[in-house]
Image (tube, rainbow, N blue to C red):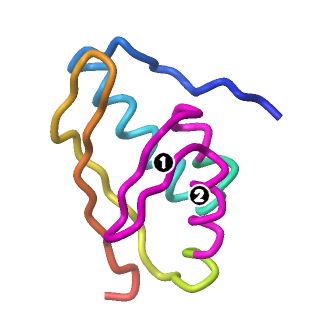
Amino acid sequence: MSTETKPPCPPFTAETAQIKVKSAQDAWNTKNPETVKMAYTPDSVWWNRDVFLRGRDEIVKFLSEKWSREDGYSLRKELFAFSDNKVEPTFHLVDLHA
């Protein structure tokens, strides 16, 4: 199994941060946790409500459980902010049944 992260990788510019956000959106909408994890660095930290996830293994576990319960939406991500080594997106869920 590959440990590489899909480019673009830090340091980020406005253009590469935008590309990173959209590639993560595309990966997410596959609803395949193994695909999604590769859009993030091995030491990624996620915050979801009251849960902090650290690293790809926790991301895969979280998404596997989430998607076994939830269906019928797609995710839209927009770039909120970035620095040379971090990207901060905003998330919007789109109901596919509406």
Q: Left of 38 or right of it: where is 1?
A: right
Question: Vertical placement of 54 versus 91: above or below?
Answer: above
Observer-nearest of 62 and 5: 62
Mark 1, secondary structure of its residue: helix
Observer-nearest of 58 and 6: 58
Residue at coordinates 57% horizontally, 65% vertically from top-left? 62
Q: Is residue 56 magenta?
A: yes
Residue 30: which numbered mark, if any?
2
Residue type at tag 1 = Asp
Cα–Cα gap, marks 2 and 1 = 7 Å
Q: Is residue 17 magenta?
A: no
Observer-nearest of 67 and 51: 51
Q: Which residue is mark 1?
A: 26
Is disc 2 in contact with disc 1, using a CB cutoff of under 8 Å? yes
Residue at coordinates 62% horizontally, 75% vertically from top-left? 65
Outermost residue to the right: 1
Outermost residue to the left: 80
Observer-nearest of 55 and 1: 55
Residue 45 location, x and y as percent?
43, 44
Question: Vertical placement of 86 versus 47: above or below?
Answer: above
Residue 77 location, x and y as percent?
30, 51
Residue 35 location, x and y as percent?
65, 47
Mark 2, secondary structure of its residue: loop
Residue type at tag 2 = Thr
Q: Left of 33 or right of it: where is 13?
A: left
Residue at coordinates 27% horizontally, 58% vertically from top-left? 91
In the picture, the quarter occupied by the N terminus is top right
Q: Left of 60 or right of it: where is 9?
A: left
Q: How many marks?
A: 2
User: Which region shows up in magenta?
Assistant: 37-65
Residue at coordinates 41% horizontally, 66% vertically from top-left? 51
In the picture, the quarter occupied by the C terminus is bottom left
